[in-house]
Amino acid sequence: MKLIRFNSTKYQERYGWVLEDRVGLIEGDIFGEYQRLEPEINLNKITLLAPVIPSKIICLGRNYFEHAREQGVEVPEIPLIFLKPPSAIIGPGQVIILPDYSGQVEHEAELAVVIAKKGRRIDPGNVSDFILGYTIANDITARDLQRKDGQWTRAKGFDTFCPLGPWIETDIDPADLLITCRVNGELRQMASTKEMIFSIPKIVSYISNIMTLLPGDVILTGTPAGVGQINHGDMIEIEIDGIGVLKNTVSQQEMIYH
């Protein structure tokens, strides 16, 4: 099932579900008890929003061998995690804004995990019980600032630096999904999730032994090789088999003088 957040002329920030080209409302809590109503709304008559607004976004660095190699860094022995702020989230079709004090902003296509319920010290064998579903993320990174700072918060945390969507797919096996990223139609990234260094059960369990996971929290599972610079006017399309396509355009931030 595909779960969405959307706006329309009649509804504001509502959850729904998608059946082919139709949308039905969801009554209740998608992280608890809910009811699906009949799909009576045309999909092309709504505006998709980011499918969830989490309390936190936990990200994995260097989770594909080839990406670590292209960055000239070692593969971590344990999952390398960092945080992005929820304020970085934008939805499908929204604009990625390039900050005026970075000269090298790059795309990073990733599979994202959406947590279903509160969890702490989750056993790897029970991780699937704590996952609502999967969506697509773009871990936008100011690479020059990442190298300059050492710490990654500034480079990863700008507003609009976490496109998310188009929906949460609840019925999919994440073990072998093809991820592709195209910029202006040019293929930049292509790899399978089976190439991850750390599996999703390992990732979720590891993180839950550090911090309590809450319903709606999002985990970005790392990006494959092929990351590259994005520029004003670009169109980025990230596709994950079985989920869909996340599209966002890029714009240069206007200079602001105080």
Image: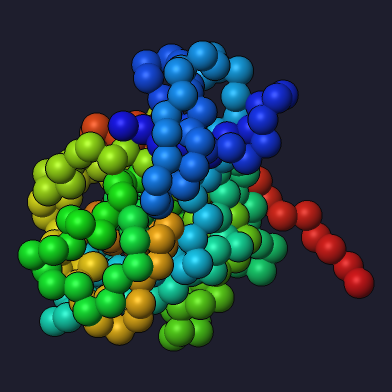
In the picture, residue 8 is in which quadrant? top right
Q: Nearer the viewer, residue 117 or 80?
A: 117
Q: Is residue 32 visible?
A: yes
Give the quarter of the figure containing the C terminus: bottom right
Residue 163 in the image, given as x and y percentages of width and height: 50, 49
Residue placed at 30% from the left, 84% from the top? 210
Q: Nearer the viewer, residue 12 or 31?
A: 31
Residue placed at 35% from the left, 77% from the top? 212
The residue positioned farthest toward the right in the image shown? 258
Q: Is 218 left, or right, of 129 in this rendering?
A: right
Q: Nearer the viewer, residue 113 or 224?
A: 113
Residue 152 in the image, given as x and y percentages of width and height: 46, 78
Residue 61 in the image, given as x and y percentages of width and height: 30, 70
Q: How is the image coloured?
A: rainbow
Disc tally is 0
Q: Is 189 left, or right, of 46 in this rendering?
A: left
Give the quarter of the figure containing the N terminus: top left
Residue 135 in the image, given as x and y percentages of width and height: 35, 45
Residue placed at 28% from the left, 40% from the top? 170
Residue placed at 41% from the left, 25% from the top? 18
> In this picture, is 150 found above or below 250?
below
Q: Is residue 104 visible?
A: no
In the picture, residue 49 is in which quadrant? top right
